[in-house]
Image (cartoon, rainbow, N blue to C red):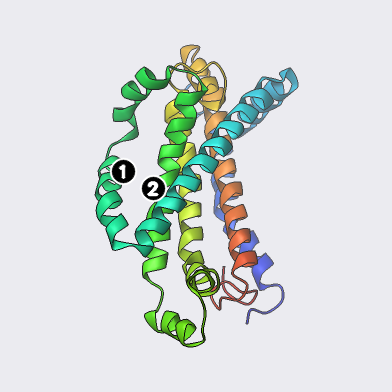
């Protein structure tokens, strides 16, 4: 079991490298070794963030992107979980579904964009569709894998104890598959932003991707770097939420309990 104070120390340690990189970056920029048009100083990026926040444009674009990501995650995550559950439980479902899913998964986002625009135009539907598509695959794969990896002896033990099929699923199979499912959630959170970046660079009138593309037209490197930093911070926050869910939902698991290593 971890000793008191160890985990906070590890959290502080994990931030040392990013902080050092920012300090070095600032020093190189202030010394003139980095051109402001190539990579502006962190202080310049912060001033830009403050100005855009005061004008309201940054918060508006951030809110739009978060709503798109949330909608796409909810739709794609639900589809991925349902299909993964069907394939995990049924070999017939695997034969009917899995090959098609894997073929679609192999198609790059950029290759799909022209067709998606034909289907949905350049409105919100196009962006939410691409996010949903990207989110569905990690959850589908990890849900299927988690169900397939359940120890058959546990299932047999449940049957010996007289559990019905629904009780087996609720008490043994889904809890056993939950670590793998939550791993899929963590991967899909990162994929959601990747898909959204691609979607928002085509015909968007708002959102972080639109903000970056608009800044490119005016050579506003500070704004472009700001959007990249925001994406990174959102990714860290989303991953932290996923880790928190793991600790809460898997408190019974020896690898995720309070005393387990993070």
Q: Secondary structure at mark 1?
A: helix
Whole-percent x, y for residue 102 in the image: 28, 47
Horizontal and vertical percent position of residue 49: 66, 27
| Residue 169 seen from this side | yes
**Vertical side of 242 occupied by 59: above or below:** above
Tag on residue 232?
Answer: none
Q: Which residue is mark 2?
A: 137
In the foreground, 14 or 78: 78
Callout 2 secondary element: helix
Q: Quadrant of the N terminus?
A: bottom right
**Crowdedness near tag 1: few (<14), some (14–19) or many (≥20) residues, C-alpha within 10 Å:** some
Q: Residues within 10 Å of mark 2 (few under 14, many from 20)?
A: many
Residue drawn where x is 65% and y is 65% of the image: 248
Residue furthest toward the top? 218
Q: In which quadrant is the C terminus drawn? A: bottom right
**Residue denoted by label 1:** 105
Q: Left or right: 164 with respect to 49?
A: left
- Residue contact between numbered discs 1 and 2, judged by CB atoms under 8 Å: yes
Is 152 above or below relative to 115? below
Q: Nearer the viewer, residue 220 or 169?
A: 169
Q: CA distance from mark 1 to mark 2?
A: 7 Å
Q: Which residue appears at 24% of the width and 49% of the height?
A: 99
Residue at the location (51% across, 69% down)? 166
Q: Position of residue 96 (x, y in %)?
A: 27, 51
Q: Residue at x 47, y 17 (%)?
A: 216
- Tell me if residue 36 can be seen: no
214 w.r.t. 86: above or below: above
34 or 230: which is nearer to us?
230
Q: Earlier in the sequence, mark 1 or mark 2?
A: 1
- In the displayed structure image, the side of residue 11 where residue 157 appears, left or right: left
Horizontal and vertical percent position of residue 27 = 57, 38
């Amino acid at each position: 079991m971890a000793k008191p104070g160890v985990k906070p120390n590890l959290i502080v340690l994990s931030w040392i490298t990013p902080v050092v990189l920012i300090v070095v970056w600032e020093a190189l920029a202030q010394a003139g070794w980095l051109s402001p048009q190539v990579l502006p100083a962190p202080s310049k990026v912060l001033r830009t963030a403050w100005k855009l926040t005061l004008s309201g444009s940054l918060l508006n674009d951030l809110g739009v992107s978060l709503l798109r990501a949330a909608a796409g995650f909810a739709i794609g995550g639900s589809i991925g979980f349902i299909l993964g559950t069907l394939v995990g439980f049924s070999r017939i479902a695997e034969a009917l579904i899995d090959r098609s899913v894997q073929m679609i998964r192999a198609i790059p986002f950029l290759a799909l964009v022209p067709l998606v625009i034909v289907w949905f135009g350049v409105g919100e539907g196009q962006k939410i569709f691409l996010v949903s598509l990207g989110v569905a695959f990690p959850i589908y794969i990890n849900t299927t894998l988690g169900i397939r990896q359940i120890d058959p002896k546990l299932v047999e033990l449940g049957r010996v104890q007289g559990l019905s099929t629904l009780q087996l699923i609720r008490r043994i199979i889904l809890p056993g598959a939950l670590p793998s499912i939550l791993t899929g959630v963590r991967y899909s959170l990162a994929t959601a932003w990747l898909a959204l970046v691609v979607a928002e660079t085509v015909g968007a009138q708002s959102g972080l991707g639109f903000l970056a593309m608009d800044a490119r037209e005016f050579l506003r490197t500070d704004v472009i770097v700001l959007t990249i930093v925001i994406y990174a911070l959102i990714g860290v926050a989303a991953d932290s939420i996923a880790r928190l869910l793991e600790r809460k939902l898997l408190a019974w698991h020896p690898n995720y309990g309070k005393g387990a290593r993070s």
